[in-house]
Amino acid sequence: MFFKNKKIKIKKLYPNLKINKDFIIQGVKPLQYAKKKDLTFFDSVKYKSEANSTKAQVCITTSKLQEFLSKKTKKVIVKNVLYELSKILSQIYPGAEIDIPDTSLTIPKKTQHKSVKFGNNVLVGRNVKIGKGTLIGSNTIIEHDVIIGKNCVLGHSVIVKNSLIGDNVIIQDNNKIGQKGFGFIPLKDKNIKLSHIGMVIIKDNVEIASGCTIDRGSIDDTVIGDNTYLDNQVHVAHNVKIGKNCMIAGQVGFAGSSNIGNNVSIGGQAGISGHLKIGNNVKIGGGSGVVKDIADNQVVMGYPATNLKDFLKKK
């Protein structure tokens, strides 16, 4: 939607792969979302169940991980999956390695957005859709193809790109949503950029306080669930999924690809490491450092975060 992809024949990339020579890659998707004509990747045993059930016909992986894939899946065996993925993304999605400023920005026309109220110095890109009753504050920028629902409020100096925003969403001043995340593949003598081709999806009735940054997904999407509240200066990295009815206090940081359940409360300045699963109804104390998965209905605190009763015993 936001990034145009080139249709490339798989044989151009991998001439020795035993597959129909006319097979054209439609896109690059995570294991669980990939369709038959998508290219996918498998770089951690943590995702072995998704690997076994993926619908993708071609998967980039390693010699050690290939056993977890279905026999029907064609394997591209490499030493470094993410490095290989970065090379493929740059060919299929040229221009997604960096955030190029939107040159289609113009002052919004009243004829295009009749029921929307705009402050001063607002700029809107091409193909932007804004629902009825929405208010956009001064000095706000909405880049191309963004969709904003009904009865939303965007404060002053907000920047939105590569995003879908639901109804009744409040985004306060000085937020930045949909920018490229912090994605690099560290090699011995160089850090390689990883293109980010996903987007940000903000569901209905979400409120985002001032000074937050929400990165778009790398291959997947970043999602904020219905009725969730983010306090000031919260950072949400690429591919993070936050469920419904969550309360996230100020200066909490989510590393990439963390999955947060429903009805989760997180105290101020807590940090959530990447690729973790936090269950439903979890409470995490302020200043905690979460470095492993947390099951449903747990109350944790400390660094590393442990069961609250155990944490208090140490005091």
Image: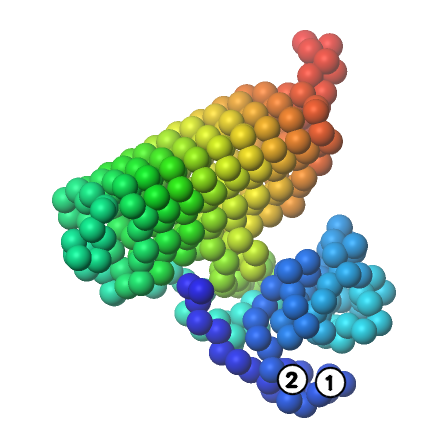
Mark 1 is surrounded, within 10 Å at the Cα level, by few (under 14), some (14 to 19) or many (20 or more) other residues, namely some
Which amino acid type corresponds to the residue marked 2 in the rendered image? Phe
The quadrant of the picture occupied by the N terminus is bottom left
> What residue did someone put label 2 on?
23
What SS does tag 2 mark? loop
Most extreme residue toward the left is 120
For the question of whether residue 309 can be seen, the reply is yes
Pick whichever, 3 or 225, lies toward us. 225
Q: Residue at x 40, y 56 (%)?
A: 162
Q: Residue at x 38, y 38 (%)?
A: 169
For the question of whether residue 83 can be seen, the reply is no
> What residue did someone put label 1 on?
19
Mark 2 is surrounded, within 10 Å at the Cα level, by few (under 14), some (14 to 19) or many (20 or more) other residues, namely some
Q: Residue at x 67, y 90 (%)?
A: 21
Label 2 close to label 1 by CB (< 8 Å): yes
* CA distance for labels 2 and 1: 7 Å
